[in-house]
Amino acid sequence: MNDILPADSALWQYLDRTVADLLAGYGYQQIRLPIVEPTELFKRSIGEVTDIVEKEMYTFDDRNGDSLTLRPEGTAGCVRAMLQHGLLGGGVGHKVWYTGPMFRHERPQKGRYRQFHQIGVETFNFAGPDVDAELIVLSWRLWQRLGISGAVKLELNSLGSSEDRARYRDDLVAYLQARFDQLDEDSQRRLASNPLRILDSKNPDTQALLVEAPKLADYLNEEARAHFAGLRKLLDAVGIPYEINPRLVRGLDYYGLTVFEWVTDQLGAQGTVCAGGRYDGLVTQLGGKPAPAVGFAMGMERLLLLIETLEQVPAELARQVDVYLVTLGEAAELAGLRLAEQLRDALPELRLVVHAGGGSFKSQFKKADKSGALFALVLGEDEVSAEQIGLKPLRSGAEQENLSWQALPARLAEII
Ligand code: ATP
Ligand code: MG
C-alpha cells in the first residue's frame, strides 16, 4: 500500500482531471461509493471460485459481527447502489463513473499493489453494442489525451450467452480432463469448479495445452454473434484497431458477450491497463429486475507508470508556483498580505506563495527560487511608502520591474 507523496500528487491530479473532463464530455456522471461493502456482495457478484474471492479479499467482522470487505473492485458496489436507490427501474439509461482505492491481497510488484486505484465506468439499461463501442471509443480518446495511445492495444472477445458458455464448458472440460496430468495445480482444481478460468491461466504449459482446445467463438449463438459483429462494425467505423483474443475471459464471473482489455508491452508482466465488458446478468444476480450493463475499470498506477515510461508527463506539472512574495519589515508584511489577497481576488488561477517564517531578503529569495516560481514579488519599507512593488524574474536574467500596486494584477495577467 503506497503513500502518494506531495511530489507525485500533481501527476495524480492531472490524471483525475483529464478523466473527469473527458467523461463529462461524454455525458457520464460521477457516483461516489463506500470503500467497504458486505462480504456477501462480492461473493455473489465476482464469484466464489475466482482469485479475488478465494484469496485476495481483506475481510473482517465489524462490531455487530457483520462480515465486511474492503472493496476489491467497484462494479459490485456500483450495482448495489443503483439497485438500492431504485435507479435501474423503467429501463432508464445511466452512465456513471467512479474513482478510488481498491484492495486485493496480491503479491506486490511493479504495477501490482495491495491498495491500488481504479477509475471505473459503468452503463446501465443499454443493451448495446452501441454503448459497448462508446466505452471503447472514450477510453481510446483518453489514451490519446494522455499521450499513450501508441503504446496500448485493444484485445477483444465475446463470451456469448450463459447457455453458450455452458455448452462450451462441457466440451472444454472433456478436452482438459483427457489431459488432466498436464495441467498446473490451480487449473486442476478449477476444472471442477470454474473451468473457463483456466483459459486465462498464466502457466505457459497450460497455455500451450489450450492452443488445440475447443474455441468459445465456435459456440456463440446468433444473437451473440450479431452483437459482436455490431461492435466490430462500430469500432471499424471510427478506426480503432483491435485484435480478437479468443482466450480473453477476464478474472471475474459476471461477464458475458463483450469483453475487452487494453494492454501494453511497456510495463512488464502487469500489461493490462484497462479491462471491462458486458455483465447483463449481474443486476438480476444481485436481486434486481433485468437490466443490461457494460463497463470497464482502469488501473491508475499502471496508467501513471506508462505515462512516465513514455515521458508524457506534461511539462507544466513541474512547476507548482507562479509567484513568490517576499517582504521585509512589519509594515511590508502587513501590506504584503493585503496585496496578496487582492491578487487572489483579481486572478483566481494565480498560484501565489506568501513567504512565511521571516528572515533576510537573501534567505527569502533562496526559498523563492527553490519554489520553482517564475517571479518574485518584492516588498520592502521603501516600496510600501511609495505604494509600489518589485517584480523580479527568477528564471531569466531580465531586470526587476517596479510597478504601482494598482498596475500589478494586469501586469501579472499578461506575463503568467
Ligand atoms: P490482472 O490480470 O493484472 O490481475 P485483473 O484482471 O485482476 O488484472 P481487473 O479486476 O479487471 O484486473 O481490474 C481492472 C484494472 O485494474 C486492471 O486492468 C489493472 O490495470 C488494475 N489492477 C487490478 N489489480 C491491480 C493491482 N493489484 N494493482 C494495481 N492495479 C491493478
Ligand atoms: Mg488480478
Image (spheres, rainbow, N blue to C red):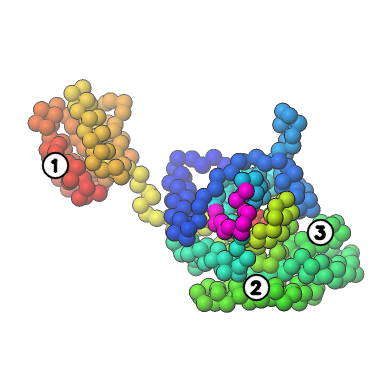
Q: Earlier in the sequence, mark 1 or mark 3?
A: 3
Type of amino acid under label 1: Ala
What residue is pinned by disc 2? 227
> Pointer 1: residues within 10 angstroms few (<14), some, or many (20+)?
few
Q: Position of residue 237 (x, y in %)?
A: 52, 77
Q: How many marks?
A: 3
Farthest residue toward the top?
330
Nearest to the observer: residue 45 or residue 4: 45
Q: Position of residue 285 (x, y in %)?
A: 74, 54
Residue 312 sits inside the magenta stretch: no
Residue 87 sits inside the magenta stretch: yes
Judged from the image, the secondary structure of the residue bearing numbered disc 2 is helix
Span highlighted in magenta in the image? 86-96
Side of 133 relative to 402 (left or right): right
Q: Quadrant of the N terminus?
A: top right
* Residue for point 78% across, 70% down: 164
Side of 369 relative to 235 (left or right): left
CA distance separating discs 1 and 3 = 72 Å
CA distance separating discs 3 and 2 = 25 Å
* Residue for point 54% across, 77% down: 236
What residue is pinned by disc 3? 194
Judged from the image, the secondary structure of the residue bearing numbered disc 3 is loop
> Where is residue 69, by image quadrant?
top right
Nearest to the observer: residue 40 or residue 181: 40
Residue 407 is labelled as 1
88 w.r.t. 238: above or below: above
Q: Earlier in the sequence, mark 3 or mark 2?
A: 3
120 w.r.t. 241: above or below: above
* Residue for point 73% across, 42% down: 39
Type of amino acid under label 3: Asn
Judged from the image, the secondary structure of the residue bearing numbered disc 1 is loop
Can the viewer see residue 131?
A: yes
